[in-house]
Amino acid sequence: MTEPPSTPPLPGPMPFPLLLDEAVWQARRHFRAVYPAVAVPVATLSTAIAILQALWFSNLTVDLGSQPAFLSPGYLTVLVVQIALIVIAGNALQVGAVDAAAGRPIDMRRAWRFSLRGRVLGTLALSGLLCLAAFFLCCVPVLVVVPLLSLVSTVMAEERLFGVRALSRSIDLTGYRPQGRWQEMALLKAVLMLFVTLILAYLIGALVSLPFQIPMYVNLFRHAAAGEDMARRMSSWIWLQVPAQFLNALASQAVDVYASFGFALLFHDARGRKEGTDLRREIDSVFAPSPLLVPGELTP
């Protein structure tokens, strides 16, 4: 039996600037409750993959007939595992953000268990395949498909819908236009939220990576100008990217915390506009049932 959807404590509708501010406030308030549970495993695996990359690159030959390490089956398998963990961790983070935005206690163990269910994994795979297909279609459709499917994780967490139903529900909520006004569509807010998230991830990632990359590139260019063997020099510097990978994973998960709360609030805002859940909440608060009445009993 599915759980009835709850309503968030925040009234809607919310303008996009208010949505951003509220996402920051919620992320700061619940950061300790949600961040370590996803940042630690993702950063640990990312660091392990960086170590494997360094080992593989150290053993890489420059013969024309040799197979590059990044095309080996072992490396590709590890890369797929890393992507899968990031996607599952992002869904667990979204579950925690949805619970917090709805005023429920946060339980990240339950969020991980929920994200590892077969129906959840299948829905995430289906959504990812659609986004990947849109990306290969000249990259332009992905600008519409990804925002339309941006509420799939929140729909699964809040309404227990999976598969095609979850995708359809996300499209229905993001595509809704209140009174025909396109500027108030949740789709536009989702596009802006994705844009803000990408900008933050890029800037924070650059700040974390540049202190490790600048000395490497300066040294490599200097020895390249001298005509030295670059493969040998590169193998000595690749180990410096291991701590950079660890810090970059921690930083990216911090940005994901903010984005998760943003999409959780966007879901409640879109559902409140479309179905009037915020109006029902206000009516219930004003016309609360009398404690003297027995449920199902008519008043005289």
Image: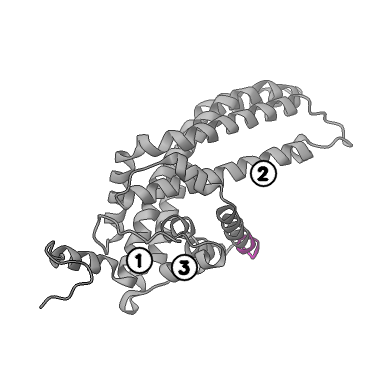
Q: Nearer the viewer, mark 1 or mark 2?
A: 1
Q: Is residue 135 magenta?
A: yes
**Residue 211 x/y as whole percent:** 50, 26
What's the mark number on residue 34? none
SS category of the residue bearing label 3: helix
Residue at the image point whose x is 52% and y is 61% from the top: 146
The front one of 280 and 209 is 280
Amino acid type indicated by mark 1? Arg
Q: Residue beneath label 1, please?
A: 271
Among numbered discs 1 and 3, the one appearing first in the sequence: 3
Q: Position of residue 229 (x, y in %)?
A: 76, 23
Q: Residue at x 59, y 29 (%)?
A: 47
Q: Are marks 3 and 2 in contact (CB under 8 Å)?
A: no
Kindly identify the amino acid type of the residue bearing the numbered disc 2: Val
Between 76 and 5, the one lying in front of the other is: 5
The part of the chain drawn in magenta is 132-138
Residue under pointer 2 = 80
Which of the two discs, 1 and 2, labels the residue nearer the N terminus?
A: 2
